[in-house]
Image (spheres, rainbow, N blue to C red):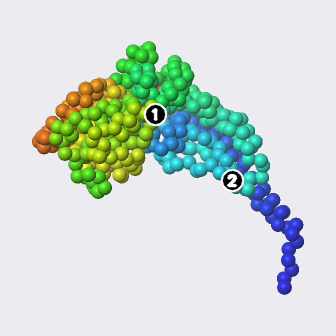
Amino acid sequence: MGRQPSPLVYPWRRMGSRLRVTSLFFSHLLRDLAGTLWARFRRWYSRVVEGGAPVAVGVDIFPFFERMTGVGWYEWNVLANLTAADPDLELRLYAHTFAAPDEPSPPALPSGERTRFRYHHIPPGFLLPVAPTLAVLRTVVEPLLLWLDGNDVFFAPNFFVPRRHHAALAALVPTVHDLAFLRLPHTVQQETLDNLRRHLPGALYRADALIAVSAATAADLGELARVGRRRVHVVHEGVDPAFTPDGPRAADLPERYLLFVSTLEPRKNVEGILAGFARAVAAGYPGRLVLVGRWGWRTESIQHSLASSPVGDRILHMSYLDRDALQAALRGAEALLFPSWLEGFGLPALEAMASGTPVILSNTSSLPEVGGDAALYVDPASPESIAAAILRLAGDPALRQTLSRAGRERAQRFTWAEAAVTTARVLRRAAGLPGEGPDEYRV
């Protein structure tokens, strides 16, 4: 029998392993610091010695750490096209810089040669106490690293800048999607309402430029927030090329159905949709209504209307669909029903048009900008108007074909590539660096 190692050897081995893990963590942190300083030197050298015009852009990416909805997809598509739009942009993506061993890894992010995301996961077996170490890293080291990045401009695609990113600020460019919290405060979640009232005025005041996703939002910025039009740049959104008429249709949905896609919350006028659909069914509409979206906030009245609907057996609610399933659902729908009270842009309408699906939209806020002459418009306050549009579309195959064709043609004019080019110009000019071309993109 071989000689057994002493029991004292195992604690020393474990200690050695933990020491190696801890040393490797801090060596990665030092390498990050060295890379940060080298990037600043290269940017200085390019500008001063080579006559270049590189731009360091800090970006808040917290929307990627939640289940993706409108703001998240807006940001994803802009960032995925931004460095191609301007090869001199260097993107620094900011969320959590340091994470505990039991915290999940980051989600998939837009990537590229000039895109950097700083993330350090404290590994299992870390030698030092995790909680106090993490506190020091987040309160001292993270702000230092963000400050050393020396950004020329900070892009805030979700209205304002999280407090933990303030050390990364330079010139500031927020995107304002809508001002529902001022226009329709009763439709906004209380926590969101309080947060926007507390932080958005300061962000608007200190912003060097503002991106509005529609002319309607730009007008609201002037009327409701007293923001000078000179600082506001309208940049329409684009549509994901994956939304096309070609491809599978949803096999698990009814043969004929109207589709609604969004969070179920007061601003979306879900009660108006339910009332209009009930009237259409009473007048002979043979199809069903499919609601796709999670329950949002202040939904008691909506839930009551759904539960008490006289045509409840014709209504199907699906909480969430991934992108492939959503595309299939849009292709098979008779129409998208989207009579919202207020939309900053209305991306579901554009995605439906790109899919060849006719759209029934409100005649208010930004939706006429998106639909143009390729949509049927209704008064969102009138269930009768909604029902009349449903019945008109259902009974006129030629009209459906006309709207389908016109919608596809119009949707092709909205591109994320153009939105990114214009966004890059706004960022560059806010940073005080040279740039050419128009600083607005409107279809």
Which quadrant holds the C terminus?
Answer: top left
Q: Is residue 49 left or right of residue 188?
A: right
Q: Is residue 217 left or right of residue 32?
A: left
Please report the residue visible at 78 percent of the width from the left and 49 percent of the height from the top. 128
Please report the residue visible at 21 percent of the width from the left and 40 percent of the height from the top. 281
Could you say whether the residue bearing mark 2 is in a helix, strand or loop?
A: loop
- Picture quarter containing residue 304? top left
The residue mark sitting in front, 2 or 1, is 1
Please report the residue visible at 38 percent of the width from the left and 24 percent of the height from the top. 217
Q: Nearer the viewer, residue 387 or 103?
A: 387
Does the image show residue 203?
Answer: no
From the viewer's perspective, is residue 305 above or below residue 225? below
Amino acid under disc 2: Pro
Amino acid under disc 1: Trp
Label tally: 2
- Give the residue at the far bottom of this rendering: 1
Q: Is residue 18 left or right of residue 65?
A: right
Of pointers 2 and 1, the one earlier in the residue sequence: 2
From the viewer's perspective, is residue 12 above or below residue 132? below
Provide residue 106's location: percent of width, then percent of height: 56, 48
Could you say whether the residue bearing mark 1 is in a helix, strand or loop?
A: loop
Please report the residue visible at 70 percent of the width from the left and 55 percent of the height from the top. 124
- Picture quarter containing residue 360? top left
Provide residue 218's location: percent of width, then percent of height: 38, 22
Labels 2 and 1 touching (C-beta < 8 A):
no
Does the image show residue 359?
Answer: yes
**Label 2 – label 1 distance at C-alpha:** 38 Å
Image mark for residue 289? none
Provide residue 152's location: percent of width, then percent of height: 55, 30
Residue corresponding to mark 2: 123
Q: Nearer the viewer, residue 436 or 407?
A: 407
Residue corresponding to mark 1: 297
